[in-house]
Image: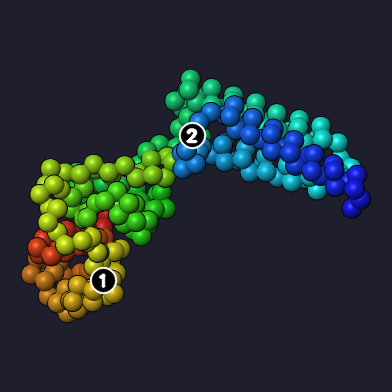
């Protein structure tokens, strides 16, 4: 690469940077976690176009600028249509999904959204929720964030010792969590039998806190 080509690369890098910053500003303010599908596609394509224009100094810069402007027009148009049309907005971004309704987990909706218990528990921890038993409603937003509405007993349960680990998820005993609670599988099966649960495969989610309060959710209970 000669000096002239190097200068072209430097100039195009700076120009692409300025153009992309301007486009991002014109696209409106959104947090990264709240980007729509259109926004993500535009971001990815802008990056690809910028790389191609920098890698090939012989290609005119117009061939990069024009697609960027077209992408901006597409994004602005889709944003306008989303404001005007609920149908269009839901088609692009999806609808909120109720994961917990009246304190019961909707496994069918979790499967439909391909949303697993590991992600669910992680997002509850991020919200500072100690136990699923404290949640009245939980809504998975189109952005992927979880909105949590705790029940009236949540404040009274602050005396629990830390976060409550699940002992059963999707019908599978979590032996590591059992051992952390200084319990074993035989104890769990015995206690469940007392409560009328013979088949562990039918239990979607189970927790026991340090006050011996049990939360048991049966698979497809809400279907």
The residue under the point 48% across, 20% down is 84
Q: Position of residue 65 (x, y in %)?
A: 76, 32
**Disc 2 and disc 1: Cα gap in Å?**
38 Å
Q: Where 37 falls versus 164 (above or below)?
A: above
Q: Where 158 falls versus 169 (above or below)?
A: above
Secondary structure of the residue carrying tag 2 is: loop
Q: Is residue 223 visible?
A: no
The residue under the point 42% across, 45% down is 144
Q: Position of residue 16 (x, y in %)?
A: 72, 37
The residue under the point 47% across, 29% down is 89
The residue under the point 69% across, 38% down is 17
Residue 177, numbered circle: 1
User: Going from the N terminus, do you reach mark 2 or mark 1 first?
Assistant: 2
Taking the image as shown, residue 177 lies to the left or right of residue 160, namely right
Q: Is residue 209 visible?
A: yes
104 or 150, nearer to the observer: 150
Residue 30, numbered circle: 2
165 or 159, nearer to the observer: 159
Q: Give the image's coloring scheme.
A: rainbow
Taking the image as shown, residue 103 lies to the left or right of residue 37, namely left
132 or 129, nearer to the observer: 129
């Amino acid at each position: 690469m000669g000096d002239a080509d190097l200068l072209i690369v430097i100039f195009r890098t700076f120009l692409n940077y300025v153009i992309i910053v301007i486009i991002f500003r014109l696209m409106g303010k959104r947090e990264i976690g709240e980007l729509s599908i259109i926004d993500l596609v535009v971001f990815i394509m802008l990056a690809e176009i910028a790389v191609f224009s920098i890698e090939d100094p012989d290609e005119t810069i117009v061939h990069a600028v024009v697609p960027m402007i077209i992408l901006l027009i597409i994004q602005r148009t889709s944003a306008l249509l989303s404001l005007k049309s609920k149908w269009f907005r839901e088609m692009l971004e999806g609808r909120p999904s109720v994961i917990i309704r009246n304190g019961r987990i909707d496994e069918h909706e979790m499967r439909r959204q391909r949303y697993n218990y590991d992600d669910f528990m992680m997002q509850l921890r991020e919200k500072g929720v100690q136990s699923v038993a404290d949640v009245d409603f939980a809504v998975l937003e189109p952005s992927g964030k979880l909105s949590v509405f705790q029940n009236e007993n949540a404040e009274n349960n602050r005396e629990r010792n830390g976060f409550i680990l699940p002992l059963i998820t999707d019908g599978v005993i979590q032996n590591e969590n059992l051992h952390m609670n200084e319990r074993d599988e035989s104890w769990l099966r015995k206690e469940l039998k007392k409560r009328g649960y013979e088949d562990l495969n039918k239990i979607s989610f189970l927790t026991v806190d340090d006050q011996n309060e049990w939360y048991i959710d049966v698979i497809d209970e809400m279907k």
